Image (spheres, rainbow, N blue to C red):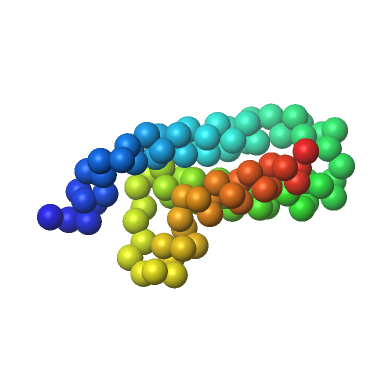
Amino acid sequence: MTRRAEVDRLPNGGWMTRILSLAVAGLFSLVILVDPYLLAGVPSWRLHTGLPIAMLGGAGLFMHGLGFVPRTWILRILFHPATAWLLFTAGGCLCL
């Protein structure tokens, strides 16, 4: 059995977190792409501090949502969904 099939059969509802991660990352990317002027009132130093961190978290959420499973332990730590959510939330808090 392949590694992908093992991940999809998680009994703890892992598919629901993947859908949530993909939806949040997609919505965030769509909002930033379509209407970047939503952040026009935020001071530029806050944007330049928080937005790169939020985008790194968004990239991690995309990887989790699409089903990327790293094989080495260091990549598992770096690309873990909790790390992605933490970066995404921290970047969002720094932007606002």
Left or right: 34 in relation to 13: right
Question: Please, is residue 1 above or below residue 95 in the view?
Answer: below
Residue at the limit of the structure toward the left, as seen here: 1
Residue, x 81% and y 47% (percent of image)? 46
Q: In this rendering, does residue 55 appear at all?
A: no
Residue, x 21% and y 51% (percent of image)? 6
Question: Please, is residue 37 above or below residue 70 in the view?
Answer: above
Percent position (x, y) of residue 38?
Answer: 75, 29
- Work out which quarter of the rendered image holds the N terminus and state it: bottom left
Task: Please state which of residues 64 and 77 is positioned toward the viewer in this rendering.
Answer: 77
Residue, x 75% and y 46% (percent of image)? 94
Left or right: 10 in relation to 34: left
Q: In this rendering, does residue 31 appear at all?
A: yes
Task: Please state which of residues 48 and 33 is positioned toward the viewer in this rendering.
Answer: 48
Residue, x 39% and y 69% (percent of image)? 73
Q: Image quadrant of residue 75?
A: bottom left
Percent position (x, y) of residue 49?
Answer: 77, 53
